[in-house]
């Protein structure tokens, strides 16, 4: 019975932000505001793309996928964080922990793949403008979407089985606000070398490869842009990539700092790392619709039209 409970624990305890318990209520307020902004912003963006036929283009279809994935990413972490900070609800079931871990990693992997696909979309639009609609046909877009989902699922889903095989006999207290693969695996009393190596390989298979291909796409884009004779044409071509570049920087830069902080920032307090990890999964979903609303003329016009009609 003891061995069975080790391999099938009923629940874990999410400590929260240890060391800042006295201000948990105050910490929850900005996260609640960020979450509300993320929900409203992405839902409005999805609504505009769905109802307006002028936005039924490949670029906006990929943007709607990004908005949907951002909703999943923020919803997988922030509500449980607020429940922990405001209600003291630290317990999470083993199946709930695995589910949260899967959707956090899966939505991050899908986000990365969508950013790569959007870079490819900009490459085709700028380098082959006359063949854009012939290259990015509906069957091609469907294949890209299926490829994104299959790749992300096939890479992330094994993490669930890598955790389910482990016994948790020593402790079930997770010093974090949400469940993530290595953080849960480190609680096990068994050898977790496979988890460590696979956890090291996942960023290589997803993030590093995506960043390399995004960089290659923008190298071709910049080469095509600087070959244009007109200064106005150059600015127009670069402006179409501005919002995408901003979103790329918001997604990958915090991830890079988080990895470097965990690897080299041994003197950094634990609560700072936990706060940074929560900001990483909360802020990009909130800022992405704002960036596209400000920098994308079509969305900006539809957004203004939507609220002007509601006022009238």
Image (cartoon, rainbow, N blue to C red):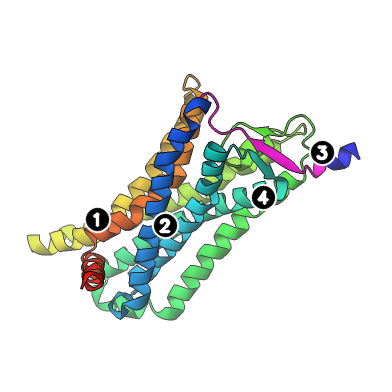
Q: Quadrant of residue 68?
A: bottom left
In the picture of the structure, the residue carrying the numbered disc 3 is 6
Q: Residue furthest top?
A: 267
Q: Quadrant of the N terminus?
A: top right
- Badge nearest the viewer, 4 or 3: 4
Write the residue at 77% across / 36% down: 168
In the image as oriented, which residue stretches furthest toward the right? 1
Q: Which residue is mark 1?
A: 242
Residue at the spot of label 2: 39
Cβ–Cβ under 8 Å for marks 3 and 1: no
Q: Nearer the viewer, mark 3 or mark 2?
A: 2
Packing grade of label 1 (10 A; few <14, some 14-19, many >=20) is: some
Pointer 1 and pointer 2: residues touching (CB < 8 Å)? no
Mark 4 touching mark 1, by CB under 8 A? Answer: no
Q: Which residues are magenta?
A: 7-20
Residue 224: x %, y % from top left: 22, 61
In the shown orientation, is residue 4 left or right of residue 115?
right
Please tell me whether mark 3 or mark 1 is closer to you in this view.
3
Element class at badge 3: helix
Magenta residues, dominant SS class: loop
Q: Give the spatial CA distance, label 3 vs label 2.
A: 38 Å
SS label for mark 4: helix
Residue behind mark 4? 96
Q: CA distance from mark 1 to mark 2?
A: 23 Å
Viewer-nearest of discs 4 and 1: 4
Q: In terms of secondary structure, where does tag 1 sit? A: helix
Q: Do tag 4 and tag 3 residues touch (Cβ < 8 Å)?
A: no
Closer to viewer: mark 1 or mark 2? 2
């Amino acid at each position: 019975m003891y061995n069975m409970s080790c391999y099938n624990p009923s629940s874990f305890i999410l400590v929260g932000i240890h060391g800042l318990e006295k201000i948990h209520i105050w910490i929850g307020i900005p996260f609640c505001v960020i979450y509300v902004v993320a929900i409203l912003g992405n839902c409005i963006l999805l609504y505009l793309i769905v109802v307006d036929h002028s936005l039924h283009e490949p670029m906006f279809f990929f943007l709607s996928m990004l908005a949907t994935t951002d909703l999943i990413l923020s919803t997988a972490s922030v509500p449980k964080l607020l429940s922990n900070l405001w209600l003291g609800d630290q317990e999470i079931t083993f199946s709930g922990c695995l589910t949260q871990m899967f959707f956090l990693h899966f939505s991050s992997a899908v986000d990365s793949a969508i950013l790569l696909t959007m870079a490819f979309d900009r490459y085709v639009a700028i380098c082959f403008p006359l063949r854009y609609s012939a290259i990015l046909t509906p069957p091609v877009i469907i294949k890209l979407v299926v490829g994104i989902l299959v790749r992300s699922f096939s890479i992330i889903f094994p993490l669930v089985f890598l955790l389910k095989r482990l016994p948790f006999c020593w402790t079930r207290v997770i010093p974090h606000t949400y469940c993530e693969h290595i953080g849960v695996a480190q609680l096990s009393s068994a050898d977790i070398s496979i988890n460590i190596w696979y956890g090291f390989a996942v960023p290589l298979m997803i993030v590093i490869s995506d960043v390399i291909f995004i960089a290659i796409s923008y190298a071709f884009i910049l080469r095509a842009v600087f070959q244009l004779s007109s200064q106005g044409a150059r600015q127009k071509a670069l402006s179409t990539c501005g919002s995408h570049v901003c979103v790329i920087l918001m997604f990958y830069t915090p991830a890079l700092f988080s990895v470097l902080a965990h690897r080299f920032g041994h003197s950094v307090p634990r609560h700072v790392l936990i706060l940074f990890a929560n900001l990483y999964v909360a802020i990009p979903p909130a800022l992405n619709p704002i960036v596209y609303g400000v920098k994308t003329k079509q969305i900006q016009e539809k957004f203004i039209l939507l609220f002007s009609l509601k006022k009238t």
